[in-house]
Amino acid sequence: MKLTNVIAVDLGASSGRLISGTYDGNKITLKEQFRFSNLPVQVVNDLNWDYIKILQEIKYGLSIAHQDLDSLDSLNVDTWGVDYGLLNARGQLLMAPHSYRDDRVNQFEDQLYNIISPFELFKLTGNQPAKINSILQLYSDLQLNPFLKTEVAHVLFMPNLISYFLTGQMRNEFTISSTSGLLDTSSRDFSSTVFKQLGFKAAWFGKLSKGGADLGPLSKSIQQELHLDQQLKVITGVGHDTAAALLALPIAPADKEDVAFISSGTWSIIGRQTPKPVVSQVAFDSGLTNEGCFDGSNRLLANLTGLWIVQELQREWSYKGEVVEFGKMVEDALSVQSINSYIDPNNELFTAPNQMEERIKTYLKETGQRLPENRGELILLVLESLAFSYKKIIENLEAVTAKPITKIHMFGGGIQNKLLVQLTANFTQKEVITGPVEASVMGNIVSQLFVSGLFKGEEVNQILENSFAAQHTQPGVVEDLSEKYQQFLKHSAYINYEGR
Ligand code: ADP
Ligand code: LRH
């Protein structure tokens, strides 16, 4: 069989990567072609994505991949959720896309929820109202810049915006759109009810692409710029990184709804697959949200501020002149005992950038808990708080769906943190299956092979099993955790949703 080379452009909120996948009919072999840092930039009062740098880095990565591989067949972009670009009728960006951590939305939250209440929004769209959601970001943009109402001609979600930069073609995709708070629970298309009430126009978003489509070739100018001597087609495959990752898990169809997944990267996303969105009062009260899978089914999940906290500690310490590798941070945490102090990772204090060490200490002081005496203790308390949050959310998922979870599939950069994986197994007392690290990339590639007609469906699990070795972590024998868990729940009001 002829080798097929596809490129996954996977953009995370800490780094972007171009990874090639070579499919030989039996397995997919990944090769990292290029990785670059991707951090939002504070520009006076706005926190923006550096979209020009992102595009430039992707072009550079493509030229490296082109030199490395004989032929490039296709490319697809997946990214983090919710962010978007606003374009005028000439297809130009009206402003730099904002990061979901930009604080312009704070002043408009109450206004939006006065028009449509949070529970009403949840029932209408399946999305748990949150500051980061595109619905609140877009509503805020329109209030802050009234000229947008007449100037906006297109809204493209981040992966679709990047694909537009590469091809000149505009198309929003289902999985990424499902993070926006703008899709209807039943039709799984843009909600005319929400649009009418908020003054958004359906034409801005265009026709939704479901199940993937061929977008067209890389634009002529980029082909020439990169001296690409062949046609590379760009595919609107899976657009959301978490939805992409689910395509990379070799789970038998019959077991799909029995396992939980934990995506552990900048964010932690903890969920399970369900046939349809779950919009009951108890799902809402449990802080869960519904997003779409590439096959049109549903992901019921909670978004938790994840290793962002660890990333910020690393960034802060390195600005102070000390380079602290993630591996060293884990070693430091392994060398100390737990001090039984906990944070609520989803507390607002931890979503904003800067001064993370101080923020953690402030939280501990305000909740009357013991302060860490060294970096190891500080990192360990963050990791324990994350693992206890995973446990609580898994309990919520089991309660809301009235169905036990048998095991956990964990993926993303965080699975390189063996301590976090073991804590997750120990605290949940469930087997944790890890891999691949680059799950979004693998899923991105799988979606391209589907769209190109190279995969039929049933054979995918076997091909995934041939492509990487999953690791199995069993829960260790641990002391009685109930007191520790109660202590965590006492200090994590947001995670402990019943307490809201
Ligand atoms: P995103 O896709 O959101 O940018 P990733 O999935 O790449 O994030 O995960 C990044 C996280 O993975 C980092 O915050 C870090 O905590 C963790 N990580 C990466 N490499 C290692 C390592 N060698 N040891 C421990 N943790 C690591
Ligand atoms: C993780 C993620 C998550 C949220 C966040 C904004 O990368 O996609 O699912 O949507 O980004």
Image (tube, rainbow, N blue to C red):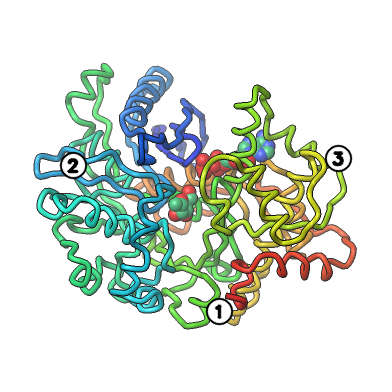
Q: Position of residue 41 (x, y in %)?
A: 41, 34
Numbered disc in front, either 2 or 3 = 3
Tell me whether the residue at label 3 lies in contact with that at label 1, contact meaning CB atoms closer than 8 angstroms: no
Q: Please state the horizontal and vertical placement of residue 197, each as a whole percent of the image.
A: 21, 72
Q: Amino acid at mark 3?
A: Ser
Eyeballing the image, is 256 above or below 144?
below
Task: Name which quarter of the figure residue 311 lies in.
Answer: top right
Tell which circle, 1 or 2, labels the residue nearer the N-terminal end: 2
Q: In percent of the image, x 41 and y 32: which residue is there? A: 3
Q: Is mark 2 within 8 Å of ligand 2?
A: no
Quarter of the figure that contains the C terminus? bottom right
Residue 156 appears in the rendering:
yes
Q: Secondary structure at mark 3?
A: loop
Taking the image as shown, residue 467 lies to the left or right of residue 366, namely: left
Mark 3 or mark 1, whichever is nearer to me? 3
In the rendered image, residue 285, in percent from the top left (x then y), is placed at: 52, 77
- Read off the residue under disc 3: 335
Please give the residue where the numbered disc 2 appears in the rendered image. Answer: 169
